[in-house]
Image (tube, rainbow, N blue to C red):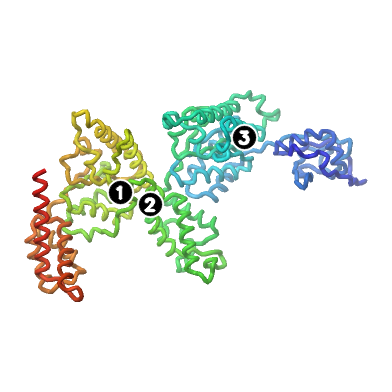
Amino acid sequence: MFGFDLSLVEPYYKFSETLQECKSITLQTTDNGIYKVLQNLGSTLATLLCGKEVELKQTLELTWFQNKIKVRIKNIEPVGIKCQITNQTTIKIERDFLLLPKKEKWIEEINNNFGGYGQQIEEIIEKLHCYQDLPFVGLLLHGSSGTGKTYLMDTIAKASGLPIFKLDLSETFKREKGQVEKYIASIFLKAKENSPCFFLIDQMEAFAPCYESSNSSFSDLDRAVLYTLIESIDEITNVNSLEYFSEQNEQKTIYLLATTEYPQSVSKEIRECGRIDFEIEIQIPQPQQRIEILNCIVKSMGLRLHNNQNEDNILETNSNTSQKIIEKTHSFVGSDLKTVCDLSYQKQILQNKENTQGNKNENGKILNLTTFLNQLEEYIPSSVQNCEWISPSISGDTKFDDLGGMDSVIQTLKTAVLTSLKSPEKFYQMGIEAPRGVLIYGKPGSGKTKLVQAIANESSLNLVSVKCSEILSKVLGRSEERISQVFLQASAASPCILFLDHIETIAAKRKKDSSEQVADRILTCLLTEMDGISKRGNFLVVGVTDRVQALDEAILRPGRFDLHIKIPDLDSKGRLEILLKKTKKMPLEKKAKEYLDKLAKDTDGFSGADIESMCKEAAYFCMRRDLKNGFISIDDLEKAKQKIQYLKHKIEKKELKN
């Protein structure tokens, strides 16, 4: 506005003989730019406003290049009557420094737009109000990607009604070195001139990276940006209070809100007292928080979740619909729920081509609950889909009922695993801690992996599956970094099961040979991560191995793998149970069905995988004999049994040689 011609303010020349002359008037504006313009006008302003009718607390509008400049009348003389400005009127200009809204009203407005985090919002607003007498207040919001840190930061600032200044990442770093620092300093200067105001920085780690996290990648530009940021903040916090606050003791605080996914990657220099004093975590939402977040998302999209039963408020606390959604959204964050809403509504529109706007009623657009729940089944939450060596789901359709010969093992797992994740308080009632790790071991093909799949399915929990051999890397330190990342992912996806397949790969016995130092470091990292499970989230580590004797003793002690479960060799009863399950949908001759009991007794030493392979081989023999209408005969079963026995003998012979 400073480039405008001051003479272009439209004057008033409409005098009224019935109104008294205004002797003096004090005008207020919240905008620093307008304040400076009006100050520069000086006595000319009275001439321009000549004839204007005014009264106390009225808001005046000045037209300037078709822009409306609003100023508020703070004081007027004579008081209590309407009067008019003349050439003799004394006009004073003041900055009207905005105050923060009342806590209750501010919190309510934020909660209406950002659900699920009432406690964190109250904490943030409480701190902003408590320290509003200081020239600078800094808060760092941190948490997993997608939890809504940036949206919350923007919502808090907008709901305050104060001016907002933002340090944009792309806008800042598109400049050359030297210009970047000047740009940052200029934004802080504008914020200082227009304080009280909010100053927002998204992805704080890009502006203030930590030396330790950056290592050799900490460039001269990074260092220059960091120190510019520190100097700009210190210039505000160290300024003399008499200079900073006006004569009327008005607050001119700059409220800095910053976000980061990893607080440890933000410089310690910027996180010290006087700069960013407070750090608040925006955690992965808990069950009821997810329902509150979903409510806000649905409302913001102008939708209404409908269950075809004409029930209102189906997202109310403890409703059947809420419980269904809670069970299907473990570890979901706000961005995941928003994506599912978008995808399900798009799918619904495609299913209703005759109405491209989707279903509507008098209350607005409808999102079908069935479509929404089906989309939830297909969607993998962002917390478990970011690592290439981590499989978000391997659970398939395996249930406990599909497993044969494991009744005692299944019962043990139901008590230890499902109870520890879903009802840990039951362990505390018994005066013990819930297990943090379960080791499942047994011969190859005994069904260890299928057992873990069944656990995940029966519990409706996320299964973070890791092939331990893929964690290993030739790059120094990369393996340890991946182990830490695996546990971070499990923490973000909690409640979940962290499945470490072939755990002996990263937890082998330590040796005295110096060549094994890398393996020792990997094991030490794993032990450290397992010791910190209780502090990191609600997840259970399930390790699987067929070489338990190769594991280091340290990993086996209580507190790490509290529960050791051996998959026993199948007896004839267990083998028969598996045979009946595997042949249930297969076309067997009547005599072949009766033969299964004898076959179970004749297959001593067969594992579950061996029996499954034998059933498949029998089907292949039948198809080669009669492709069209064949039924599996006793002869097919016998041939399949002999083939599997031969293959097992060959493998065992090879292992003995090695």
Going 89% across and 47% down the picture, which residue do you hit? Answer: 14
Mark 2 and mark 3: span between their CA atoms?
41 Å
34 on left or right of 418: right
Image side of residue 607 versus residue 379, left or right: left
Q: CA distance from mark 3 to mark 1?
A: 46 Å
Residue that numbered label 3 is attached to: 187
| Mark 1 and mark 2: Cα distance apart in space | 16 Å
Q: Position of residue 571 (x, y in %)?
A: 10, 57
Label 3 residue SS: helix
As drawn, the residue found furthest toward the right would be 17
Q: Secondary structure under badge 1?
A: strand
At label 2, which amino acid type do we have? His
Q: Which mark is residue 330?
A: 2
- The residue wearing badge 1 is 465
Disc 1 vs disc 2: which is toward the camera?
1
Specify the quadrant of the image occupied by residue 521: top left
Report if residue 498 is visible in the image: yes
Q: What amino acid does circle 1 point to?
A: Ser
Q: Earlier in the sequence, mark 3 or mark 1?
A: 3
Q: Residues within 10 Å of mark 1 (few under 14, many from 20)?
A: many
